[in-house]
Image (tube, rainbow, N blue to C red):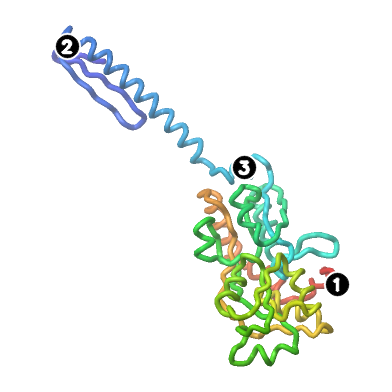
Amino acid sequence: MRQFHGKYFVFSRLNKYVAVVFFKSTKSHHNLRRNLMKKILALSSLISVVLLIFISTGVAGPVMERIVSKGHVVIGTTGTQPPLNATSKAGELIGLDVDIAKLIAMNMGVEVKFMTLPFSELLPALIAGRVDLVISSMTITPERNMNVAFIGPYYISGKGILTKSKHLDALQGASGLNQPQFKVAALKNSTSQRFVEKEAPKAEFIPVESYDQAIELLFQDKIDVLIADSPFCALTAFRYPDKGLTAGQDRLTFEPLGIAVTEDALLINWVQNFMVSLNGRGELKRLTEKWLKDGSWTSQLPE
């Protein structure tokens, strides 16, 4: 408090802001000055607390902070969607999704841990904080994007058809899939399910929890058609030529695949920048060709 020309000026520095209050130096204003000083000090303390809270929460979002403090990142995936993700004979996860996840962890300076779940449980696990990221051949859709963020796309896929050769002529007819005699399977809560419901409402829809389950049903003639990602359909037909399986040649839809993450600005920005770098230096292209063009790795899969 300083006196100039019979008036007192109170200077209160509130971080970058300066509050200046002046009043006449009279006895009647003594209580006013004292109360005003208390209010200014209280306001200054309040602003300091708010800034401390902002700084402490602004440095790292909750998910990134959790990853760093634990020393590992938890990746949610099915492990049953080759060539994007699969489980080898040795019980190890392999595929494009898996390689991307490992590189993310390595560049974060943490370990990677995988949590395998049915496809329909992946986003609920992400929202509940059981996993930090979902990398599992997941299509970016407006509906999903209402609840989680997506980084990508890291690969452009599309719906394909996997069936037995005996059904091919009927499927290529005017009605295609949309016939009541067809039993059509797709992953539960997937874009494939929505495709069947929209494009083939007359067909009998059979929801499945995994591609492995669908293949068994196809082998046993309990379903006629599987709608799935086109790379998976082509790979499965290639792996089981003796089972009479065949895959459609054309993609039925446009499916951009992305990495799902909950709201955490720092983590989203970090993963996004990492994927830009991975793509820019040609590493993403190399990994994509390794898993989707070179079939030598299929020997690692169970029979």
> Residue 110 — which label?
none
Q: Residue at x 38, y 29 (%)?
A: 47
Point out the tag, 2 or 1, that comes first from the N-terminus: 2
In the rendered picture of this protein, how many numbered marks are placed on residues? 3
**Circle 2 or circle 3, nearest the eye:** 3
- Disc 1 target residue: 303
Secondary structure of the residue carrying tag 3 is helix
Picture coordinates of residue 20 (x, y %)?
A: 24, 24
Near mark 1 (Cα within 10 A), the count class, few <14, some 14-19 or many ≥20, is few
Picture coordinates of residue 278 (x, y %)?
A: 61, 62
Point out the tag, 2 or 3, that comes first from the N-terminus: 2
> Residue 25 — which label?
2
Looking at the picture, does residue 132 appear above or below residue 202?
above
Q: Nearer the viewer, residue 184 or 262?
A: 184
- Disc 3 target residue: 66
Q: Label 1 is placed on what type of residue?
A: Glu
Q: Label 3 is placed on what type of residue?
A: Arg
Picture coordinates of residue 207 (x, y %)?
A: 67, 69
Point out the tag, 1 or 3, that comes first from the N-terminus: 3
Q: Nearer the viewer, residue 121 or 222?
A: 222
Looking at the picture, does residue 225 appear above or below residue 61?
below
Q: Tell me the distance, in whole angstroms, between the alpha carbons under discs 1 and 3.
A: 39 Å
Place residue 94 in its image quadrant.
Answer: bottom right
Q: Tell me the distance, in whole angstroms, between the alpha carbons under discs 2 and 1.
A: 94 Å
